[in-house]
Amino acid sequence: MSTQELVYFIDLGGTLVFAISGWLAASKKQMDPFGASVIAFITAVGGGTLRDLLIGSQPVGWMVDQNYLLMIAGGIGLGFLFKRYLEKLRKTMFLFDSIGIGLFTILGIEKTLSFGLTPVIAVMMGTVSAVFGGVLRDTLANEVPLIFRQEIYATACLTGGILFLVLGHFNVNVDVRIILTVVYIIALRIVSVKYKWSFPTIK
């Protein structure tokens, strides 16, 4: 499998898990199926849409490839069918969100670099890809977005993106780089929540 194909499947995977995350967030607020579907859609494509607009990739990915819409539909279907089961699992949405930001961080970096932009911009766009869908999800669900709370969220994406680039500098296999980066981001999120690591608030 080529790197381009791998990045594509990462994008589809991230779209699926973010759609599930959006659906679960909406169901928690007791929205109707249409409202929950809108939240799932926005969560899944919001970050990637903003990234593509910023780097000049138009039309944006989901508009030219129906597989993205199929992934969103699949995420909505899974959320609908297994809602009761998923709600019984502690921190299920947290896990889906963590997987999603890990996948989207890598995707954003790779796509930005393919447009000839600098590694610094690539890390920034990777973070935008990862967190902006969640910002829209939380805003529409009447929650303070995670990126604006004390929780370590965007920082996990930024440092994970740097790790991905550093490993690439040392010619680490791309599959290994992806696995290590996603595991790092998920682990940092879990550990930071478990031990209540956070940045000080402005007073």
Image (cartoon, rainbow, N blue to C red):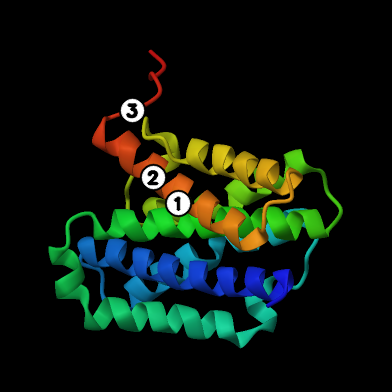
Disc nearest the viewer among 3 and 1: 1
- At mark 2, the secondary structure is helix
Q: Residue at x 29, y 59 (%)?
A: 93
Q: Amino acid at mark 3?
A: Trp
Residues at circles 3 and 2 in contact by the CB criterion of under 8 Å: no
Q: Residue at x 50, y 72 (%)?
A: 13
> In the picture provided, is 195 more to the left or to the right than 70?
left
Residues at circles 3 and 1 in contact by the CB criterion of under 8 Å: no
Using the image, tell me which numbered label, if any, was put on residue 183: 1
- In 3D space, how far apart are the residues under numbered discs 3 and 1 (Cα atoms)? 18 Å
Identify the image quadrant of the C terminus.
Answer: top left
On the image, numbered disc 2 is attached to which residue? Answer: 187
- In 3D space, how far apart are the residues under numbered discs 3 and 2 (Cα atoms)? 13 Å
Neighbourhood count class around disc 2 (C-alpha, 10 Å): few under 14, some 14–19, many 20 upward:
some
Indicate the position of residue 96 as horizontal and vertical percent values: 36, 61
- At mark 1, the secondary structure is helix
Indicate the position of residue 180 as horizontal and vertical percent values: 52, 51
Q: Residue at x 53, y 59 (%)?
A: 103
